[in-house]
Image (tube, rainbow, N blue to C red):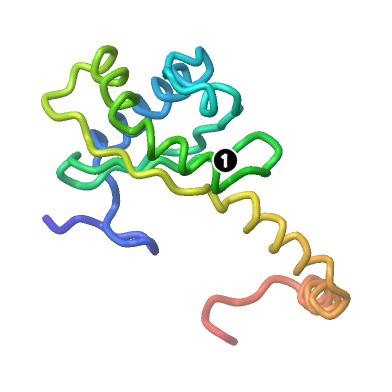
Amino acid sequence: MARSKNQNGPSKSQRQLRVGELIRRTLSTVLARADVHDPALNAMSITVAEVRTSSDLKIATVYVMPLGGSGKDEAIEALKRNKGELRRLLGKDLKLKYLPDLRFVIDQTFDQMDATREMLARADVRRDVEKAEDDGPMDGDGA
């Protein structure tokens, strides 16, 4: 049986989702407790929004955002600099055969939401949306 695909490519397995969520929770706890021996990283308040794992669970992409959205580059550099220690701390809490390599990127979700909100607030878009609502529901067959 073929796997179903969503718009973003192949769907994630339950194991990928579960491991990603375990890493997210554990990493959030480690960062909140300031367990890392780096004063610069401990001084930052970083939100771990999501963790996506590769299909073989060898790579985990960690989507982060510093509190307030400022200092993004510094946060990524501090996380990359302490990647080894973060993996070691994760390994103490997670019982996985292989601990994934961590890759840190800035979470763009809030920026995308703001852009969408701004677009929907534009007069021409609002006019089109109101016109579509006045026309009633669209038929699926185009009739």
Left or right: residue 28 versus residue 89 is right
Q: Where is residue 27? Give x, y as percent.
A: 41, 24
Q: For residue 60, what is the image quadrant?
A: top left
Q: Where is residue 26? Give x, y as percent.
A: 39, 20
Judge whether 129 appears above or below 62 on screen.
below
Q: Nearer the viewer, residue 21 or 46?
A: 46
Q: For residue 13, what is the image quadrant?
A: top left
Q: Secondary structure at mark 1?
A: strand
Judge whether 137 appears above or below 110 on screen.
below
**How many numbered circles does the render carry?**
1
Judge whether 53 appears above or below 36 on screen.
below
Q: Nearer the viewer, residue 116 or 47?
A: 47
Q: Where is residue 111? Give x, y as percent.
A: 65, 55
Few, some or many residues within 10 Å of mark 1 (<14, 14–19, 20+):
many
Question: Who's the residue at 52% across and 81% down the image?
Answer: 141
Left or right: residue 7 versus residue 31 is left
- Amino acid type assigned to the residue bearing label 1 in the image: Met
Q: Nearer the viewer, residue 70 or 98?
A: 70
Left or right: residue 87 versus residue 116 is left
Question: Who's the residue at 46% across and 17% down the image?
Answer: 29
Judge whether 67 appears above or below 132 on screen.
above
Which quadrant of the figure contains the N terminus? bottom left
Q: Nearer the viewer, residue 1 or 37?
A: 37
* Residue at which label 1 appears: 65
Which quadrant of the figure contains the C terminus? bottom right
Question: Who's the residue at 75% across and 73% down the image?
Answer: 136
Left or right: residue 143 versus residue 87 is right
Q: Where is residue 77? Give x, y as percent.
A: 46, 43
Question: Who's the residue at 72% across and 56% down the image?
Answer: 114
